[in-house]
Amino acid sequence: MRVPSAVLNNVVYLYDAGKSIGTGFVVGVPAALGSKEVYAYIATARHVVRGRSNVSIRINGLNGEATHIDVNADSWWLSPRSYADVAIAFLPGMPDRISPTVIRPDQMGDQNFLIDRGVCEGDEVLIVGLLPRLPGQNKNLPVVRFGHIARLNEELIPTMGPGQILEQLDGIMVESLSWPGQSGSPVYVTFPITREMDGNFRMYVDDGPVPPRRFWALLGVLSGHWPIPQSIRPSDPDGVEEDVPDWYIRSNSGITVVTPAQHVLDLLNSFDVVEDRMKRAEHEKAQEVLGVQDSGDSETFTKADFQDALRKASRRVKPGVDTPD
């Protein structure tokens, strides 16, 4: 199966004080009904950025090289739902230097999509993310891993959160290994345009110029692997095992937990985020009336302006068009 270029060009890396901490990807909301322009955001797992104050993203630029952008701690919106491991932040305005592919709402597999398309156990998925020791010298070169849906999210999944605190997550279980650095990666579900559902065959037709052989959509955000706790029972010199319940190791089960894309959509459409987007639109409209334009010239874009752009202005970019095979 050929991997669509759209999902490869979409990934960014996250760092804290120069140390890699996870992966993110670019999502967007249309600036207006029917518009091809979108407000762009970075999406990732909540636990990757929660409590951090020195986060930066590494994103590919138009010149073929990666550039770093600082993200202030107060720029992140964290999902208020304890069971949704999702966070987003505005992508700052540097249109002459970065041009990522944007995943639009209609490319996200919300709950209605999962039901309508019959997404179920056994469907193929692909995960695009950071390999910490090999991120790419001059630009982001993500790795792609493949797997299958092992269990849908019919009930919450118990897992260990930060500080070894037990959390209950809304998660889809995927048969695929994960490692540190992949948290926050986009996970896509893909299947042929013709598939059997309840003994009947359905064919899904795309309205693009070239009908694809396969359909794909954002399934969700990688939260992490689901560990299997195993207790350690040391033996005394006489060979008698002693049960020590407080001692245990966490083995990788080969199962990865994915937060459903519905939570990304819900966060993008939450009251605070929508209200902020409306304020930005009003500000841009006022600038147009006054004949004022934001400078996109990197030569005059100061460090202070750069930090201010992340907090007070969102960038509009055109979503990428890709026809996956």
Image (tube, rainbow, N blue to C red):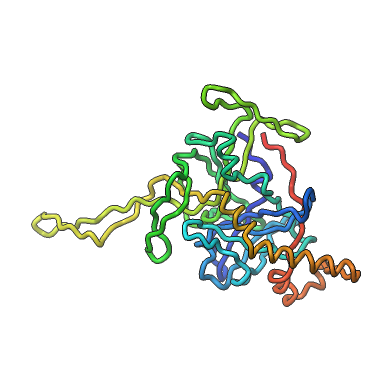
Q: State which quarter of the image contains the N terminus.
A: top right
Outermost residue on the left side: it is 238
Picture layout, residue 180 above or below residue 220:
below
Position of 53 compared to 256: left or right?
Answer: right
Picture layout, residue 214 above or below residue 223:
above
Position of 153 compared to 56: left or right?
Answer: left
Identify the residue shown where x is 31% and y is 56%.
249
Q: State which quarter of the image contains the C terminus.
A: top right
Residue 294: percent from the left, percent from the top?
83, 68
Identify the residue shown where x is 73% and y is 75%.
303
Outermost residue on the front side: it is 271
Picture layout, residue 271 above or below residue 254:
below
User: Based on the displayed image, in which of its 4 quarters is residue 219 positioned?
Assistant: top right
Position of 161 compared to 288: left or right?
Answer: left
Residue 112: percent from the left, percent from the top?
59, 41
Identify the residue shown where x is 34% and y is 54%.
250
Q: Nearer the viewer, residue 61 or 315?
A: 315
Q: Nearer the viewer, residue 66 or 313?
A: 313
Q: How many marks?
A: 0
Position of 68 compared to 48: left or right?
Answer: right
Identify the residue shown where x is 45% and y is 44%.
154
Residue 162: percent from the left, percent from the top?
43, 64
Residue 245: percent from the left, percent from the top?
23, 59
